Image (tube, rainbow, N blue to C red):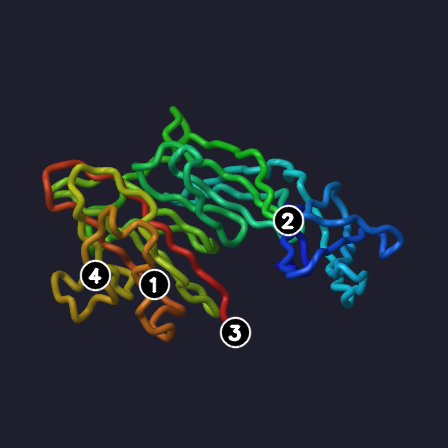
C-alpha cells in the first residue's frame, strides 16, 4: 500500500498487488473485496486499515496494517491583529491549531507563502492587500483573513529611505518580514533588519514583481548602513531581480556563517523609467 502512518485529508489509498485483494476497517472482523488499484475510507477520526492479497485458491497473504488519522475538516480562520513599531506594521497571527502553519498571499489567494514565527512584519508602500490563513497538519486550509495595507488612516504605508546611510529599519523580534515598494529611475529603497543572537537568515526571496521592465537591481550588505557604494567585494550578494527570480532564495549559496547575528541592509533599485512594484520576503530561523 502506498500510504504511511500519520494525519491526512485524503481517504483514498492506493494498493499495489498482482493478486486479488481485500481490506478491513474493523481489525479483521469483516472484509471487503477490493477492485482496481485503490479504495476510499470515509469519516474523520483514527483509522486502522488492514489489507491482504488472496489468490484464486483462497490462499491469503500476510496482513499489511496501516494506521492514520483522517481529517477533512477545515480549521477555523486565524485571528489577526495589527500593531505598529516605528515604520513596521506587524500582523500578529493567533488561533492556530496544534501543528498547523500559517500562510500569506499577495495575489488574491492565487499563490501562498509559508510564514514563520507568530507575525508578518511589513515595511513599505507598494502592497495593498494581504491575505492570511492557516493550514492544519492534514493539509486543510482555513478561510482567509484579508487586510488592506493602504486603507485610509491605516498608517500602514511608509516609503523606504532613499539614503543608504540612513536606511529604514524593520522592527526587531520578527521571523517573517516583507519589504515592499514602488521604484523608478532615480529612486532607490534602503531597508535594514537585525538578526538576533542564536538566529540567522534562512532566505531572502522576491515574492512580488509587477512591471513592464523585467530587470531591477538589488544588493545586500552585512552592515547597519549601505556604504559599499558600487564595490561588489563589500556586498554579501548582488544582482538583477525580475519575474524570472520570483521565489528564488538569493542567499542559497552563501555560507551559513555569514548569515548570523548582526545587521543587514538591502538596496533595491529600478534603473529604467517604468515603475516597478516589488515585495521581498526575509525569513529568519533559530539556530543552536
Q: Answer above or below: position of 54 versus 288.
A: above
For the residues labelled 3 and 4, the Cα–Cα distance comes to: 28 Å
Q: Are circles 3 and 1 on residues that touch, CB within 8 Å?
A: no
Q: In this view, does 78 lie to the left or right of 150?
A: right
Q: Is mark 3 on a helix, strand or loop?
A: loop
Q: Which of marks 4 and 2 is nearer the N terminus?
A: 2
Determine crowd level at label 1: few under 14, some 14-19, many 20+ residues with C-alpha closer than 10 A.
some
Residue at 17%, 71% in the rendered image: 233
Q: Residue 185 or 65: which is nearer the viewer?
A: 65
Q: Quadrant of residue 127?
A: top left
Q: Quadrant of residue 134?
A: top right
Work out whether residue 52 can be spotted. Answer: no
> Which labelled disc corresponds to residue 36?
2
Work out whether residue 133 can be spotted. Answer: yes
Q: Comparing marks 3 and 1, which lies closer to the viewer?
A: 3
For the residues labelled 3 and 2, the Cα–Cα distance comes to: 50 Å
> Which labelled disc corresponds to residue 263?
1
Determine crowd level at label 4: few under 14, some 14-19, many 20+ residues with C-alpha closer than 10 A.
some
Q: What element carries label 4?
A: strand
> Which labelled disc corresponds to residue 238?
4
Determine crowd level at label 3: few under 14, some 14-19, many 20+ residues with C-alpha closer than 10 A.
few
Residue at 46%, 53% in the rendered image: 174
Q: In this view, does 135 lie to the left or right of 194?
A: right
Q: Earlier in the sequence, mark 3 or mark 4?
A: 4
Q: Is mark 2 on a helix, strand or loop?
A: loop
For the residues labelled 4 and 2, the Cα–Cα distance comes to: 54 Å
x, y percentage for residue 246? 30, 49
Q: Comparing marks 1 and 4, which lies closer to the viewer?
A: 4
Q: Mark 3 points at which residue?
A: 288
Amino acid at each position: 500500500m502506498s500510504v504511511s502512518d500519520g494525519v491526512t485529508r485524503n481517504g483514498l489509498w492506493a494498493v499495489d498487488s498482482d493478486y486479488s485483494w481485500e481490506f478491513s476497517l474493523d481489525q479483521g472482523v469483516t472484509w471487503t473485496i477490493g477492485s482496481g488499484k485503490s479504495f476510499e475510507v470515509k469519516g474523520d477520526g483514527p483509522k486502522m486499515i488492514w489489507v491482504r492479497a488472496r489468490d484464486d485458491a483462497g490462499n491469503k497473504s500476510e496482513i499489511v496494517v496501516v494506521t492514520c488519522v483522517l481529517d477533512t475538516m477545515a480549521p477555523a480562520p486565524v485571528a489577526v491583529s495589527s500593531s505598529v513599531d516605528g515604520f513596521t506594521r506587524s500582523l500578529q497571527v493567533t488561533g492556530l491549531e496544534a501543528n498547523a502553519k500559517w500562510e500569506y498571499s499577495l495575489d488574491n489567494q492565487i499563490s501562498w507563502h509559508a510564514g514563520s514565527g507568530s507575525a508578518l512584519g511589513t515595511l513599505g508602500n507598494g502592497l495593498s492587500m494581504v491575505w492570511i490563513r492557516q493550514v492544519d497538519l492534514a493539509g486543510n486550509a482555513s478561510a482567509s483573513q484579508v487586510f488592506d495595507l493602504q486603507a485610509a488612516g491605516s498608517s500602514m504605508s511608509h516609503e523606504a529611505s532613499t539614503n543608504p546611510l540612513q536606511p529604514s529599519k524593520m522592527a526587531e523580534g520578527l521571523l517573517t518580514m516583507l519589504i515592499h515598494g514602488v521604484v523608478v529611475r532615480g529612486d532607490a529603497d534602503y531597508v535594514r533588519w537585525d538578526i538576533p543572537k542564536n538566529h540567522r537568515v534562512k532566505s531572502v526571496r522576491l515574492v512580488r514583481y509587477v512591471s513592464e521592465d523585467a530587470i531591477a537591481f538589488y544588493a545586500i550588505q552585512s552592515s547597519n548602513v549601505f556604504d559599499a557604494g558600487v564595490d561588489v567585494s563589500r556586498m554579501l550578494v548582488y544582482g538583477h531581480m525580475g519575474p524570472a527570480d520570483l521565489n528564488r532564495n538569493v542567499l542559497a549559496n552563501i555560507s551559513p556563517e555569514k548569515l548570523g547575528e548582526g545587521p543587514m541592509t538591502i538596496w533595491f533599485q529600478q534603473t529604467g523609467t517604468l515603475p516597478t512594484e516589488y515585495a521581498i520576503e526575509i525569513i529568519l530561523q533559530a539556530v543552536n
